[in-house]
Amino acid sequence: MFDRYRQEAEARRAKGLPPLPLDEEQASELCRLLEQPPPGSEALLLDLMENRVPPGVDPAARIKAAFLGALAVGKAGSPLIGVEKAVEFLGAMQGGYNIEYLTTFLEDVRLAPLAAVQLKNAVFIGDGYKKVADRMGTNPWAGQVMVSWAEAEWFLNRPGLPEKISGIVFRVDGEITTDDFSPAAEAGTRSDIPLHALSMLRRRVDSPLETIADLKKKGLPVVFAGDVVGTGSSRKSAVNSLVWHIGNDIPGIPNKRRGGLVLGGKIAPIFYNTLEDAGALPVECDVTALETGDIIAVFPRQNRIIIESKKNREVPFYLRSPVLMDEVRAGGRIRLIVGRTLTATARRHLGLVESDVFARPPRPAEKTGGFTLAQKIVGRACGKKGVVPGEYCEPVLATVGSQDTTGTMTRDELKELACLSFGADLVMQSFCHTAAYPTDRDRAMHRNLTAFFVERGGIALKPGDGVIHAWLNRLILPDTVGTGGDSHTRFPVGISFPAGSGLVAFAAAMGKMPLDMPESVLVRLTGKRHNGITLRDVVNMIPLTAIEKGLLTVAKENKKNIFSGRIMEIESDQPLTVPQAFELTNASAERSAAAAAIRLDPEQVREYTCACRNFLEQLLAAGYQDAAAIRRRMAAMDTWLADPDLLAADEDATYAAVVDVDLSALREPVLACPNDPDDVRILSAVAGTGIDEVFIGSCMTGIDHFRQAARILSRVDKLSSRLWVTPPTRMDRDALAAEGALAVFQRLGARIEIPGCSLCMGNQARVSPGTTVMSTSTRNFPHRMGDNTRVFLGSAEIAAVCAILGRIPTVDEYMRFW
């Protein structure tokens, strides 16, 4: 093992990578070697034990904790690790398997002082809290630990944010998406953070990592700056990659870093929150004066940046909350939340008033008017009538979703959180991004994640079942809150706040999530759609209207976006089905909205929930696990169906803005143009553009979209463009096959993909380089679907016509097929 590890480590070092963390087998062998260390290996063995074993409840951590525990009580021996060092190493394991040993040591006169020191600085205590609390009356060391937790010494013992942060700027112009930071084509390496980070920005700028390395030679921390930072998917891998290059190593946690400073003219909401989780400091400010190589000084408490290399030019900024500085000090937002809860619980146990150690979030403005629908749904999850914009809250979550290209990161975060059973009522894991063309690594991941999630009480889908959103939406409860590790986790009923994998892990483990309640923007859909205008056209008409009203700009410098970071609340004067509602709420991701909620008819929701309840019975009969979680959700649906009432916005509810969209004014389809989902234009403005490939699929599609496309395509005998067809679920695929629609696509030579994300993600199948594409998918960022592609986004109907003609049709040509 030792020789093999060194060979593998050398191979990675040659690529500029640290060695992989030790697995369970390697950790066991390491423990044996530490008992009788080979000459000359002492320093390496100690480093491996201290820094190369994953923390929390990783299987290797269990081996490490057991060995250190045996060393501490004398049941094992090592010439390199004495009793004091063994307890110290145990304390550095964050939480999980080590806590059982440390709390037990409080009963040992010899070990109690050592264990108390380690417990005082721990925050992921879990069941260990009760053991300490129960002993504090008779055990002085337990009493000391409780007092320490109450006084927040775990926090105060860490260095605070300095008054001045010096750095050297690495600047990237324009919009930097999460796909730039974490390319979809490299999704298989995301859980190996250092390896995945090698791909960061490679397709966006020339020699980005070489430039960063040269900047570091100046002896200053690198500060990342960009006009619009982190739009797109909710990939913590994007933050992981960025922080790997600008952050700091974490003692005792291999191959992961935290910290760093990110400056953005606009930082996308999910990316902003994920930076908080990583212990980085996100700052929104005017970045137009910043260039790569600039030397700057940031004064976080004075809200100003000095560009020292430009005659001390000053740039002001507004730090959203003083809590941000606490998050950096604590080592990240999640660690701060868990630690604050520990301190508050200990203080209540000791009969003390609330601690004044921690910064408080800004007090929201006084409530005027009633509550919006979103404010009521979140309020109910907090045990209140409603919450106001700016209010910090921690809503209870009914539903949490995890998908495969972020699932391995969520798994690792759950291990660090010492999670052995889920706290959220329902947690689902899918395999929609990797099922079509699985590698050996993917197949192993499918097995391992399935076992991991089911063991903790979650529901695991099967490869080939299809897109997670199409499944998760069948499990949601009306008027409840959820989250998911994919930015398109946007519920058609209730509300969801998508998040990065770290926050998804926290939500799954704790059953709640931190939330600074965003403002809401009301989108009112009025008027009746004309013939030929689809709901996808309505999706694109929303940003078109916002552009016309000056509420949204396509240009990235000084970009305007009324929806960014806010909740999009939608009302329609025409009836909408629940699947139609998802098409609308789903698209709020492209608007960079924090969430979306939509007013629906209670009868529509009742019928939908009844169908979903029957669907869950089918899952049970098919042997899906965890059965208890499925039955629990069925019971919750039965409870709601017994009294099918829906929350509604108050008539005097107030909004940050109201966008009125008159559907009767639209007489031709609207498309999103290459390569920006905000760059929407009417059909006649782009008609005649040649189309090489067409994709009909993604979570933006439902079975009716494929039916309509098949209806159009059934009229012709050949196609002029290459056609890809990917039903979102196996149920849709089977129904389309039974109806004969699938046969239409097959007759025309379409490439029919296994149900899943396919080209929308672009991590497995990809279109040919340099092609122009018409797609029904969600996003059209550069290089997402293929290298150097130009991608239009539109309805399934217009996609079908493009496949026939080989170009974007005129309005008349389109209407002839309607």
Image (spheres, rainbow, N blue to C red):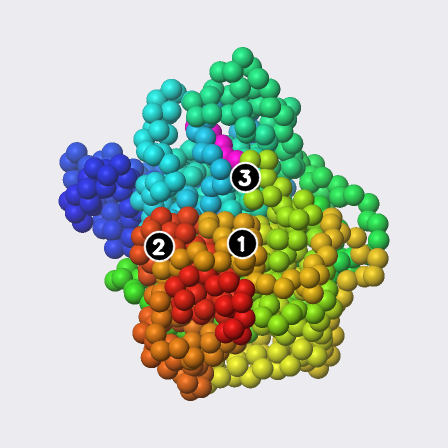
Q: Residue 164, relative to residue 479: is it above or below?
A: above
Q: Is residue 223 magenta?
A: yes
Which badge, 1 or 2, comes first in the chain's sequence?
1
Residue position marked by numbered label 3 in the rendering: 556
Q: Residue 281, relative to residue 759: is it above or below?
A: above
Of helix, strand and loop, which mostly describes the magenta segment? strand
Q: Give the residues in magenta.
A: 222-227
Q: Residue at x 34, y 34 (%)?
A: 206
Q: Quadrant of residue 586?
A: bottom right
Name the spot of residue 276 as percent of width and height, x first.
54, 42
Name the spot of residue 151 as percent of width and height, x first.
63, 38
Nearest the viewer among 559 and 369 is 559
Task: Answer with left or right where residue 553 lies relative to residue 702.
Answer: right
Residue position marked by numbered label 1 in the rendering: 685
Q: CA distance from mark 3 to mark 2?
A: 25 Å
Q: Looking at numbered disc 1 in the image, what kind of residue is underneath it?
A: Ala
Nearest the viewer among 104 and 767 is 767
Task: Answer with left or right where residue 640 lies relative to residue 259.
Answer: right
Disc nearest the viewer among 1 and 2: 1
Residue position marked by numbered label 2 in the rendering: 771
Q: Taking the image as drawn, is residue 770 in sight? A: yes
Which badge, 3 or 1, comes first in the chain's sequence?
3
Query: SS for tag 2?
Result: loop
Query: SS for tag 1?
Result: helix
Q: Looking at numbered disc 2 in the image, what kind of residue is underneath it?
A: Thr
Disc nearest the viewer among 3 and 1: 1
